[in-house]
Amino acid sequence: MTKTAIVIGATGLVGQQLVTQLLASEQWHKVVVFVRSSLNVSDEKLLEHVVDFADMPQWQADIKGDSLFICLGTTLSQAGSKTAMRKIDLELPLAFATLAKGNGVNDCLLISSYLANAHSLSHYLRLKGELENQLAQLGFQRFIAFRPGPLLGKRKQPRFSEQVVAAMQPIFRAPYSPLRAWRGISADQLAHTMSVYALLDDNIAKQVVQGESLFQH
């Protein structure tokens, strides 16, 4: 079995790891990425589109493949406002996924967040919950939402909250810790789990992968 993967958010912490792993896998014959700036990666399996995400109709015909991986995400401080954050975390991935579904893409795999809920008091968690709900309604053959806790790895722009959580990992990882649900997951582990689920031969239309399931592959 050889498949074509589509990745948005390929320059992010998990997205970079995911692209690297997909390119190294014999089960993916092509990896298509849509980015604002080049990854500067040379690989015959990689098809890179440097695009303006505000002008999707101009290149929507290029969104073709088997599985769409959505690895986009920002913070309020990075986005600058709740409106800008909503565009990045909700509107952009939803618009892209809608075009992908229209082009016959079968699967959609999303990096969401632990405690994502469309009714959350947290703006961040509410956006993630809303996105999950709307993607699930697009009618993909399979929609999988991965809900990790803090993401561990070296970012170009470090997030203070994740640095604090990373320092506290020994406490969170303790077998009987009441805070175990908040333990972090490394970017490469999450990328690996996503790629494994993408290749599963099942007929489950919607799945939520969280907790221990994130670490079992």
Image (cartoon, rainbow, N blue to C red):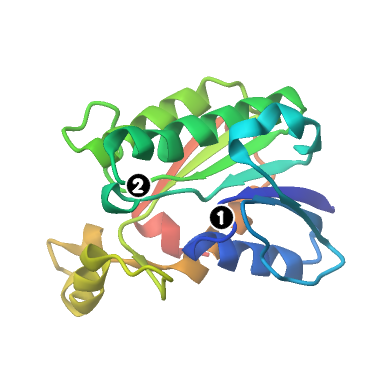
Towards the viewer: 201 or 210: 210
Towards the viewer: 13 or 145: 13
Classify mark 1: residues with Cα within 10 Å, few (<14), some (14-19) or many (20+): many
**Residue that carries the numbered disc 1 in the rendered image:** 194
Classify mark 2: residues with Cα within 10 Å, few (<14), some (14-19) or many (20+): some
Q: Identify the mark at residue 19; answer none if there is no mark.
A: none
Towards the viewer: 82 or 7: 82
Image location of residue 124, percent across then percent down: 28, 41
Tell me if 47 is positioned left or right of 9 in this view: right
Residue 120 location, quadrant:
top left
- The residue positioned 25% from the left and 72% from the top of the image is 163
Q: Is residue 189 above or below residue 194?
A: below
Q: Is residue 68 above or below residue 43?
A: above
- The residue positioned 62% from the left and 57% from the top of the image is 195
Image location of residue 147, percent across then percent down: 38, 48
Residue 155 location, quadrant:
bottom left
Image location of residue 1, percent across then percent down: 84, 53
Towards the viewer: 38 or 123: 38
Q: Secondary structure at mark 1?
A: helix
Of tags 1 and 2, the one toward the viewer is 2
The answer to whether residue 151 of the structure is visible from this angle is yes
Identified by mark 2, the residue type is Ala
The answer to whether residue 174 of the structure is visible from this angle is no
Residue 154 location, quadrant:
bottom left
Tell me if 4 is positioned left or right of 138 in this view: right
Total numbered labels placed on residues in the image: 2
Identified by mark 1, the residue type is Met
Q: Secondary structure at mark 2?
A: helix
Structural distance between the alpha carbons of marks 1 and 2: 26 Å
**Residue that carries the numbered disc 2 in the rendered image:** 79
- The residue positioned 14% from the left and 67% from the top of the image is 177
- Circle nearer the N terminus (1, 2): 2
